[in-house]
Amino acid sequence: MATGIKDKVAIIGMGCTRFGERWDMGAEELMVEAFKECIEDAGIEKKEIGAAWLGTCFESINVGRSALPLSLTLRLPNIPVTRVENFCATGTEAFRGACYAVASGAYDIALAMGVEKLKDTGYGGLPSFTGSDSGSLSWQWFPNMTAPGAFAQLASAYAAKYKIPDRDLKRAIAHVSAKSHANGVLNPKAHLRKAVTEDQIMAAPIIAHPLGLFDCCGVSDGAACAIVATPEKAKELGKKDFISVKALQLALSSGEEMGYNDWDGDHFVTTSQCSTKAYNEAGITNPKEQISMMEVHDCFSITELVTMEDLHISERGQAYKDVMDGMFDRDGETPCQVDGGLKCFGHPIGASGLRMLYEMYLQFYGQAGERQVEDPQFGLTHNLGGFPAMNVCSISIVGRYGE
């Protein structure tokens, strides 16, 4: 019988670059920067790594389609390396591969690396998914869709279902963004480090109503990585009170949201189901009380707000009130985006999932500086790739080994 991954994998080292417009570095240099911090933190030598996973999303402007760039760049000793991609869940997918390899007993130590170089394309936005090699997802499902437009529809559906006045919803999502900006100020590795008021956010140009300029995450370069090991190996290396993986879950849309009328467009089916499975795997019975901190996929401010309900932290239709009550502020009941989130830390797609875990790791070891959360018990990370009607959701829960 399957027993899940709880306490079968220890995180023994992590590293993360500064995110931003890294014109001075290519993807390879970013990987080196993250890996250097990670392996020094782990206190091991490269020859002890048994296998590695590389996560990148846009291979055409990055490192290409094979896993060789990771092996060549880091001079890994002829070990198995696998490249993975799963939209915005790519970094967590690399982490999942390394964790499952260790949990299976195939390796004592494995590496997960996520990297994305997005700024040297010659234009300001993301590359298109509608190229000739992008497959049926583009021409069948969203040939005319934009990300701001799709998530603006999510906001409109949420407001309509719960009869929330337009200004109240805009004020709530403005608070979400202002909170992330305030947290980003305290993070030396964040892309955007400037405080912004709710009034400034509400007065900003509209991108897709009700989402304004400050409700959208930017485009960043960056890399993050983790070294994982069996608990036995972690103890052998002298690690004490180490962080272990409590749950790893992945859920992909089945097509029912787009093909039938049951889904009303106000929430993420995958996140609701994925989080329930993750809590069961981790042995969490009351997430609102037991989850100490979260890093969620705030590609747009409305996404973070709705996700609070899909994670079963807020009641349905009540997240906008919880946001305004400060529940998810840095000093609130359940701090969210303590490092600035996608909104302000940045969103180099292949790296984001591992960047979220990096913040959890720092918090558990008391290394988060001014943004430190007091005595965390469980930390949750959440990625969402794609669009509300069709997406990939990944959830990780971490905590101290044996607790």
Image (cartoon, rainbow, N blue to C red):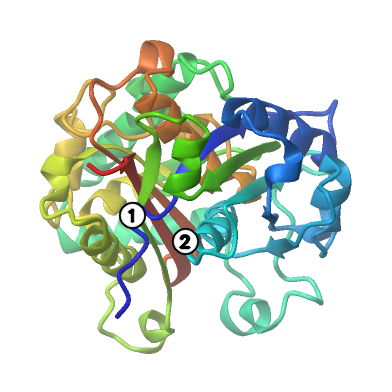
Sequence-earlier tag: 1 or 2: 2
What secondary structure is found at the residue carrying circle 2? helix
Q: Residues within 10 Å of mark 2 (few under 14, many from 20)?
A: many
Residues tagged 1 and 2 counted as in contact (Cβ below 8 A):
no
Classify residue 224 as left or right of residue 128: left
- On the image, the x and y values in percent for residue 308 come to 25, 49
Classify residue 18 as left or right of residue 32: left
Q: In front: 294, or 206?
A: 294
Q: Residue at x 19, y 57 (%)?
A: 283
Q: In front: 270, or 282?
A: 282
Classify residue 345 as left or right of residue 197: right
Number of callouts: 2
Q: Residue at x 33, y 88 (%)?
A: 260
Q: Is residue 62 visible?
A: no
**Hey, which residue is sitting farthest top in the picture?**
370
Tell me the number on the disc at residue 155: 1
Q: Residue at x 67, y 81 (%)?
A: 139
Tell me the number on the disc at residue 103: 2
Residue type at mark 1: give it.
Answer: Ala
What secondary structure is found at the residue carrying circle 1? helix
